[in-house]
Image (cartoon, rainbow, N blue to C red):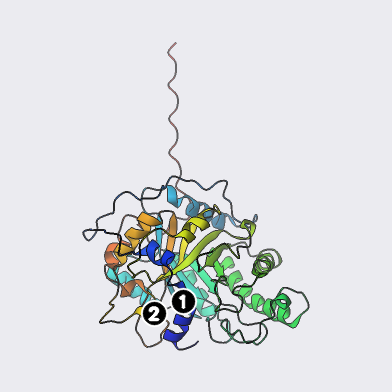
Amino acid sequence: MLNGKLGRYLRKSALSLSFAAAAIIGAGVAVTVSRYSTPSTPTVATDIRLPGAAPADPRASATTRDIFNYLSGLPNQSSHRLISGQWAGYGKVDTVELERIEKMTGQRVGLVGADYLGFSHGPRIETSSVNASMIAYWNQGALVDIDVHMPNPWTGGGSMDKSVVKFAEVITPGTPAYKAYMADLDKIAEGLKELQDAGVTVLFRPMMEMDGNWFWWGKQRDFPKLWAQTFDYLTNTKGLHNLLWVYSAGSRKPLEYYPGSQYVDIVGYDAYSYGTTRSGKAKGYEALLTTGKPFALTEFGLQSAEYNSKTNPPHDLHKAIQNVRNHMPRAVYFMAWSNAKGDGSNYWGIDAQRNAPAALNDEWVQNSPVPRKPAEAAPRPLPPQSKK
């Protein structure tokens, strides 16, 4: 990839928007808490239920359907309704960081994420190492997220290579770009099939931040067609029924390139710069709720360009979680991002933030093991029998 700080900054610079900052930490929102206290009643109603929700794949596996129903029901729980997540690497899983979080907090995160590729380097697709780790974490009780920053199908370069983009070609069967894209999907499908065979349901997040201009697929009018093409190929042609499809936007208008609810299971956006002083509610959050899909903070962290260990030390993660509770109460998980600088420092990880133990031990948060079925409703009492 590009050098970590520059590459991540280029990718995320457009994300330092008020909607992301306000929804997460908003230092302008006064919250005074003790180490493990809980905030006041959320300012947004939490009793809205998803209408007739079901996975986009009508043939989704029983486990996948159960997990979808569990996620859909989280906003109706009184506690343990925001799954903790840590993204852990490109082409491999940083087990050291995950172990560090567990040692620091006494908790294992409820969601582990990784990418089969990188967002700026070439098209080498690595599935075996990622899968080995993901199967292990799944067996320990975590949920699994797989991202794919698709290579440029015209040049063979990385996802940020925009030197050649003729978008109509990638959705036109028979063109070289179409063939290259589908060949990459074949490799990704092999990895996802290995997870399916191991019984692992995947929160699958392809081609994120489609509403930004930093990836070759970004701001393309026909992006919804590419998403639908990808969904159809992996679901119907490749027979992958262990996927929950995550639509992950990154701007003020997160539904501008939405492919339709028949192709999406979870909606969210990538929220950075949560250390700013802005406050208020996120318009993006409210817009995404209109889809009726479970909502998530699909990436979550401090903007790398803002980080300075002396003048801008790590932020209070517990306060961030409390502001999610107050301003985005229907969020079902957050995925803390990880280091991309490459020099051992870490801007975004859970272990790099203050009050991480309090955050992961807050009653609002669900860690591993994560229930994989919705909570059963208490049986209704039998009516009293009439006396004869």
Q: Is 25 in front, or is 226?
A: 25
Q: Where residue 341 appears, x then y in whole percent?
A: 41, 85
Tell me the residue at 48%/81% (across/down). 10
Residue 6 shows in this picture: yes
**Picture quadrant of residue 194:** bottom right
Outermost residue on the top side: it is 388
Three-letter residue code for mark 1? Lys
Q: Are marks 2 and 1 in contact (CB under 8 Å)?
A: yes
Q: Where residue 239 appears, x then y in whole percent?
A: 67, 65
Total numbered circles: 2
Q: Where residue 82 appears, x then y in whole percent?
A: 40, 58
Q: Which mark is residue 304?
A: 2
Residue 203 shows in this picture: no
**Picture quadrant of residue 180:** bottom right
Q: According to the image, label 1 marks what residue? A: 12
Tell me the residue at 30%/82% (across/down). 308
Answer with mark 2 or mark 1, whichever residue precedes in sequence: 1
Outermost residue on the left side: it is 34
Tell me the residue at 42%/78% (across/down). 94
Q: Where residue 288 appears, x then y in whole percent?
A: 52, 58
Mark 2, Cα crowd under 10 Å, few <14 / some 14-19 / many 20+, is many
Three-letter residue code for mark 2? Ser
As drawn, 310 above or below 373: below
Q: Is residue 227 left or right of residue 81?
A: right
CA distance separating discs 2 and 1: 8 Å
**Picture quadrant of residue 126:** bottom right
On the rendered image, what quadrant is the C terminus found in? top left
For mark 1, give the secondary structure.
helix
Mark 1, Cα crowd under 10 Å, few <14 / some 14-19 / many 20+, is many
Tell me the residue at 59%/60% (across/down). 264
